[in-house]
Image (cartoon, grey):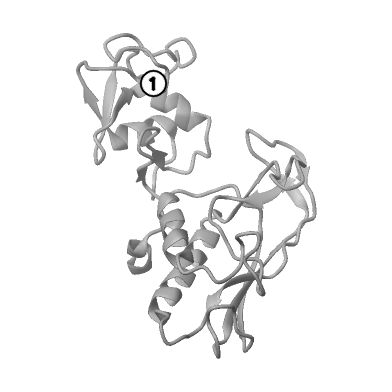
C-alpha cells in the first residue's frame, strides 16, 4: 500500500543533502533553517535538513516539503514546486460523478465523412470536504456534451485518439478532470470547474477555441494529461 502519512511520503521521495542554494518554498538559504521550523515543531525532521528529489534533483528544506504536502491533498504523492515532476500517483479533488462515452455519425469540421466520439460528464450536487472547502456545497453543475474528436479520417491517427481517450479515463478515475474552485467564465466561487485538461465543447465552429478544426488538440491534451501525471505508462500498470 502507498504510504500517505506526511513524514513517510517526504522521506520516501527526498534524499537528505548537506548544504547549497535557496529553498524556493520558504525562500531561505538551504544552509539556513527552514522557514517552517516554527510550524512543524512536532516533526522528527531536523529544521536544517535539506532534501533532494530523487529524479529531478531539485533541492528544498525537508520541513518545507512536509508543510507543502500537509497542506495539500495528502494522497501519497509529491509534486516538485520547481519543475512540476510528480512522484507517486497524483489524485485530485474532483467530486463524484459519472463519465459516459459514446459515438455518433455526425462529422466534425476538418474530419469529413467521419463519426465523433462524445464524452458526457455528470456531476451531482454534494459537499466538498477538504481543507479549502470544508462543509461548503458545490452547486449542481452538469456540463454540456464534451466532444473529444473524430473517430476516423484519412489523415487522422485513430490509435492516437484511442490512447488519449484511455488516458482521459485514467484522469477521471484519479479525480483530475474537474476540481472545485472559482469559475473563470462566471466568477462564481465554490463551483465545479475544469482542472487544466482541456476538452472540446463546440461541434460546429472553433470561434472560442473550444471546437474544431484544431490539428494540435490531441498533442496539447496529451501534454496537459502528462502535467497531471497521466502518461502512456499508466496504461500498462
Residue at 39% over, 74% down? 160
Rendering coords of residue 69 (x, y %): 46, 32
Give the camera-side residue of 84 and 17: 84
- The quarter in which the C terminus is drawn is bottom left
Residue identifier under label 1? 63
Using a 10 Å C-alpha cutoff, classify the residue at mark 1 as few (fewer than 14 neighbours), some (14 to 19) or many (20 or more): many
Image height check: is 55 above or below 209? above
Residue at 45% over, 13% down? 41
Rendering coords of residue 34 (x, y %): 38, 14
Residue at 60% over, 84% down? 107
Tell whether 85 sits left or right of 203: left
Rendering coords of residue 85 (x, y %): 35, 43
Image height check: is 158 above or below 18? below
Give the quarter of the image for residue 101.
Answer: bottom right
Give the camera-side residue of 85 and 129: 85
Outermost residue, left direction? 18
Where disc 1 sits, the SS reads helix
Give the quarter of the image for residue 205.
Answer: bottom right
Tell whether 97 sits left or right of 8: right
Give the camera-side residue of 70 and 184: 184
Number of labels in the image equals 1
Give the camera-side residue of 9 and 187: 187
Outermost residue, front direction? 207
Residue at 63% over, 33% down? 131
Image height check: is 228 above or below 188? below
Rendering coords of residue 164 (x, y %): 45, 69
Amino acid at each position: 500500500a502507498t504510504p500517505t502519512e506526511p513524514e513517510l511520503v517526504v522521506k520516501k521521495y527526498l534524499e537528505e543533502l548537506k548544504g547549497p542554494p535557496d529553498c524556493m518554498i520558504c525562500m531561505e538559504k538551504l544552509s539556513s533553517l527552514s522557514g517552517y521550523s516554527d510550524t512543524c515543531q512536532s516533526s522528527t525532521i531536523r529544521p536544517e535538513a535539506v532534501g533532494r528529489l530523487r529524479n529531478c534533483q531539485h533541492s528544498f528544506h525537508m520541513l518545507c516539503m512536509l508543510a507543502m504536502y500537509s497542506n495539500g491533498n495528502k494522497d501519497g504523492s509529491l509534486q516538485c514546486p520547481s519543475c512540476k515532476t510528480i512522484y507517486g500517483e497524483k489524485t485530485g479533488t474532483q467530486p463524484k460523478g459519472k463519465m459516459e462515452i459514446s459515438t455518433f455519425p455526425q462529422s466534425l469540421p476538418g474530419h469529413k465523412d467521419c463519426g465523433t466520439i462524445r464524452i458526457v460528464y455528470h456531476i451531482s450536487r454534494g459537499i466538498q470536504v477538504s481543507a479549502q472547502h470544508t462543509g461548503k456545497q458545490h452547486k449542481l453543475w452538469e456540463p454540456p456534451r464534451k466532444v473529444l474528436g473524430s473517430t476516423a479520417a484519412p489523415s487522422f491517427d485513430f490509435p492516437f485518439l484511442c490512447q488519449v481517450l484511455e488516458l482521459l479515463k485514467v484522469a477521471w478515475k484519479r479525480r483530475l478532470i474537474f476540481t472545485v474552485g472559482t469559475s473563470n467564465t462566471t466568477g462564481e466561487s465554490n463551483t465545479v470547474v475544469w482542472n487544466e485538461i482541456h476538452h472540446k465543447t463546440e461541434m460546429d465552429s472553433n470561434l472560442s477555441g473550444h471546437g474544431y478544426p484544431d490539428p494540435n488538440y490531441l498533442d496539447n491534451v496529451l501534454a496537459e494529461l502528462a502535467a497531471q501525471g497521466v502518461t502512456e505508462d499508466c496504461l500498462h500498470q
